[in-house]
Image (cartoon, grey):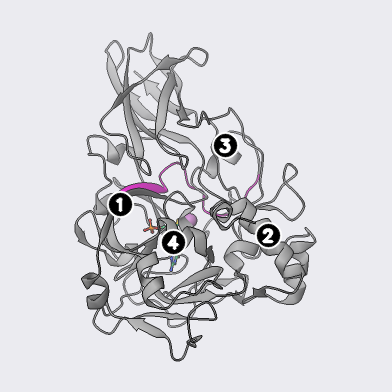
């Protein structure tokens, strides 16, 4: 298979499973029995994944209990965030009147456990594995400190980071389906301007060989424990083709040093791929000549359900979505003309047009405003004079550069990933 094809996660996943069955891959952190279950399409039991209607979504952090500070360090005022366990969702009305980028004070946070505080002076990026010349070991890796990284040629990238589970709650509220995981509405996404050094630069300096196939960055946050099982540090492999194409080791966000909650001192930014790929607080990076697996591509982030193959499909790039910059259940004054504002985005590239429905049946084109950025989102607006007081369901539907658009419903998957259907946003006119 052409290496480039492996930037498509579906192709990558199918190849990796075949390689694993032939004994050519290692399933780090998973038993052979569990891998056989994945390969046989039985799937893994969803441990510690409460059903949506249940409360907290997070497992207890491993290691020392967190101190006075919560799992997220920055302030989470209720007018900017809705807190779900260890995670904080951006309120879309908090983006109203903001510019293209999501300011750090309102950027969503998704933490499997808690934000660690790392010393930027003693921190090291550590590369090792069979895909590097001389096969450096984890104990004796190729190291870079922050000053060395900052001295390398930097790149800037404006891109969204979006959780694969963004919109998950609508599987239940719109489609009546049970799913496990954090009950996000549409606020588990944000666009920022990231600056850092291309991962490709660092891989080459570390001695990347032609034999390398996978790169697995690992977080320095506490181990993730799910259903009483310690799954180890948060980590997820990427194919070398994607790692070399456009991945950034970011140390700046919106012109400021990367904040603790978003991965300080250094995180990956993997454009257009689901949020879990963008490992925060990165420390070790394994570069391997044989394919790698972790629970984050075997147990989590697979589409499992009646409309998917038995072994599930690896969650790939994000899908097309749209959101209004309005509070959920917002109140609007009757008898007046309002300007409804929103944003739409897609992993495939720029959004070409957006339609809005206020009456449940007809659609009007919204006016696209501001810039169009490949890996970012598109802002839009449309005016609306509600005909009478009452409750309304506002809907927005975007179409991207490839013609991909938002359907009315999406196939169910047990963990509620990739809710790309049109969302019905309730407002009250009085
Ligand atoms: N080390 C580490 N990296 C991580 C995570 C984590 O819990 N630990 N969460 C991932 C997930 S699921 C998402 S959606 C994004 C969220 O990035 P943010 O918190 O900066 O918005 O980070 C990813 N990187
Ligand atoms: Mo995520």
Residue of label 4: 244
Q: Dots 1 and 4: beta carbons under 8 Å?
A: no
* Quarter placement of the N terminus: bottom right
The residue nearer to you, when weighing 315 against 137, is: 137
Element marked by disc 1: strand
Nearer-N-terminus badge (3/4):
3
Q: CA gap, disc 3 to disc 1? A: 35 Å
Give the crowd class for mark 2: few <14, some 14-19, many >=20 residues within 10 Å.
some
Q: Where 173 falls versus 332 (above or below)?
A: below
Q: Find residue 73 and report its horizontal and vertical position in percent.
A: 30, 66
- Magenta region: which residues? 178-191
Q: Where 395 falls versus 274 (above or below)?
A: above
Q: Residue at x 42, y 14 (%)?
A: 364
Q: Which residue is drawn at 57% across and 58% down?
A: 3
Residue 430: image quadrant is top left
Residue of label 2: 15
Element marked by disc 3: helix
* 165 is within the stretch colored magenta: no
Q: CA gap, disc 1 to disc 4? A: 15 Å
Residue of label 3: 173
Q: CA gap, disc 2 to disc 1? A: 30 Å
Nearer-N-terminus badge (1/4):
1
Q: CA gap, disc 4 to disc 2? A: 19 Å
Q: CA gap, disc 3 to disc 2? A: 36 Å
Which residue, as the protein is rendered here, is positioned at the far left? Answer: 255
Give the image quadrant in which the ligand numbered 1 is located.
bottom left
Q: Which of marks 3 and 2 is in front?
A: 2
Element marked by disc 2: helix
Left-right relation of 333 to 40: left
């Amino acid at each position: 298979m052409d290496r480039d094809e492996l930037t498509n996660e579906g192709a990558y996943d199918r190849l990796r499973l075949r390689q694993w069955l032939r004994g050519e891959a290692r399933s780090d952190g998973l038993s052979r029995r569990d891998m056989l279950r994945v390969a046989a399409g039985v799937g893994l039991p969803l441990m510690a994944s409460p059903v949506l209607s249940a409360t907290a979504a997070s497992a207890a952090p491993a290691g020392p209990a967190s101190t006075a500070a919560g799992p997220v360090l920055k302030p989470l005022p209720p007018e900017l965030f809705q807190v779900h366990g260890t995670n904080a969702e951006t309120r879309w009305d908090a983006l109203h009147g903001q510019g293209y980028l999501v300011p750090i004070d309102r950027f969503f946070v998704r933490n499997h456990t808690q934000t660690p505080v790392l010393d930027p002076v003693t921190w090291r990026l550590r590369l090792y594995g069979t895909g590097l010349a001389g096969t450096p070991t984890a104990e004796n890796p190729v190291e870079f400190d922050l000053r060395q990284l900052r001295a390398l040629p930097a790149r800037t990238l404006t891109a969204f980071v979006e959780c694969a589970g963004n919109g998950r709650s609508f599987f239940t509220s719109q489609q009546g389906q049970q799913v496990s995981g954090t009950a996000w509405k549409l606020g588990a996404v944000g666009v920022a301007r990231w600056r850092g050094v291309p991962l490709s630069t660092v891989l080459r300096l570390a001695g990347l060989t032609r034999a390398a196939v996978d790169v697995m960055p690992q977080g320095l946050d506490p181990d993730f424990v799910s259903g009483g099982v310690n799954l180890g540090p948060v980590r997820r492999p990427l194919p070398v083709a994607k790692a070399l194409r456009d991945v950034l080791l970011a140390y700046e966000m919106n012109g400021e040093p990367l904040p603790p909650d978003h991965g300080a001192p250094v995180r990956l930014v993997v454009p257009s791929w689901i949020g879990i790929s963008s490992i925060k607080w990165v420390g070790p990076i394994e570069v391997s000549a044989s394919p790698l697996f972790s629970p984050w591509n075997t147990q989590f982030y697979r589409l499992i359900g009646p409309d998917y193959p038995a072994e599930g499909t690896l969650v790939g790039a994000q899908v097309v979505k749209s959101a209004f910059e309005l509070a959920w259940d917002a109140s609007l004054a009757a008898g007046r003309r309002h300007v409804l504002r929103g944003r739409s985005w897609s992993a495939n590239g720029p959004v070409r047009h957006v339609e809005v429905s206020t009456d449940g049946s007809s659609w009007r084109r919204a006016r696209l405003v501001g810039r169009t950025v490949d890996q970012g989102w598109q802002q839009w607006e449309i005016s609306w004079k509600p005909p009478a007081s009452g409750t309304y369901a506002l809907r927005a539907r975007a179409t991207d550069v490839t013609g991909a658009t938002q359907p009315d419903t999406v196939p169910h998957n047990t963990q509620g990933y990739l809710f790309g259907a049109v969302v019905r946003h309730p407002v009250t006119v009085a």
